Image (tube, rainbow, N blue to C red):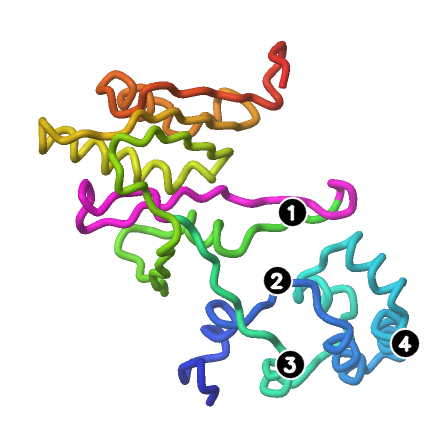
Amino acid sequence: PHERLPVCSLRTLLTRFMDITTPPTRQLLTYLASCCSDKADEERLLMLANESSVYEDWRYWKLPHLLEVLEEFPSCRPPAAVFVAQLNALQPRFYSISSSPRKYSKEIHLTVAIVTYRAEDGEGAEHYGVCSNYLANLQPDDKIFLFVRSAPSFHMSKDPTRPVILIGPGTGIAPFRSFWQKWDHIKSEMVDCKIPKVWLFFGCRTKNVDLYRDEKEEMVQKGVLDRVFLALSREENIPK
């Protein structure tokens, strides 16, 4: 038993708690070499573990996760219990909450970019961002492990007359969405309450990934946002 991990099956351990997608360290490769029945596999793993330049080139080119390493060295058969002890715990991923509790009292919204990429100059196997794809594949009523971490230094000014400029490229717009939802709630619930003058600058690659476009237009129409500026970096016929 581990002080930070529950008693569970090997499957649960590998799918929920251990990091099996980060390229293995040289220390782990040394251990894997000791588990090979084929001399050529053992020697190659030891070369990767002992020669830093060879390791860095291999790691940068392939960005291999654990399964790919075991497939590349098929004679490597580490004992499960000892093997798992060599792995690092999966680290939490932090996302900004993109909803206001005043508008969604029983919900937490996240704005997450789904990460996919290929190694080997785009010719290798497709790799997937661990948490973003996990969240994307969730079904209604699925349970997830999460906790809320406060950010006491990141908040709106208490002075409602102070103008605000918000700059959020890509998913960086997430916390600002919670801001404008709060201002919208204040404006609709308390007619005489003042909200600040707000300019929002948002950047993305092309128009089709303009996040919350309709919602931003609605906020401008309602006077919650005064101006919204869109910067596109890869839209045809539009300079950066």
Q: Which residue is mark 1?
A: 126
- Residue 133 left/right relative to 81: left
**Is residue 102 located in the magenta-colored stretch of the structure?**
yes
Q: CA distance from mark 3 to mark 1?
A: 26 Å
Q: CB under 8 Å between callouts 2 and 1? A: no
Residue 208's disc is none
Residue 43's disc is 4
Between discs 2 and 4, the one toward the N terminus: 2
Amino acid beneath label 3: Gln
At x 64%, y 63%, the residue is 22
Between discs 2 and 1, the one toward the N terminus: 2
Between discs 3 and 4, the one toward the N terminus: 4
At x 34%, y 43%, the residue is 98
Disc nearest the viewer among 3 and 1: 3
Provide the secondary structure element on which disc 1 rests.
Answer: strand
Q: CA distance from mark 2 to mark 1?
A: 12 Å
Amino acid beneath label 2: Thr
Using a 10 Å C-alpha cutoff, classify the residue at mark 1 as few (fewer than 14 neighbours), some (14 to 19) or many (20 or more). Answer: few
Residue 63 on image: x %, y %: 72, 56
Disc nearest the viewer among 3 and 4: 3
Q: CA distance from mark 2 to mark 3?
A: 14 Å
Q: CB under 8 Å between callouts 3 and 1? A: no
Q: Which residue is mark 2?
A: 21
Residue 86's disc is 3
Q: Residue furthest top?
A: 237
Q: What is the span of residues highlighted in magenta in the rendered image?
A: 97-123
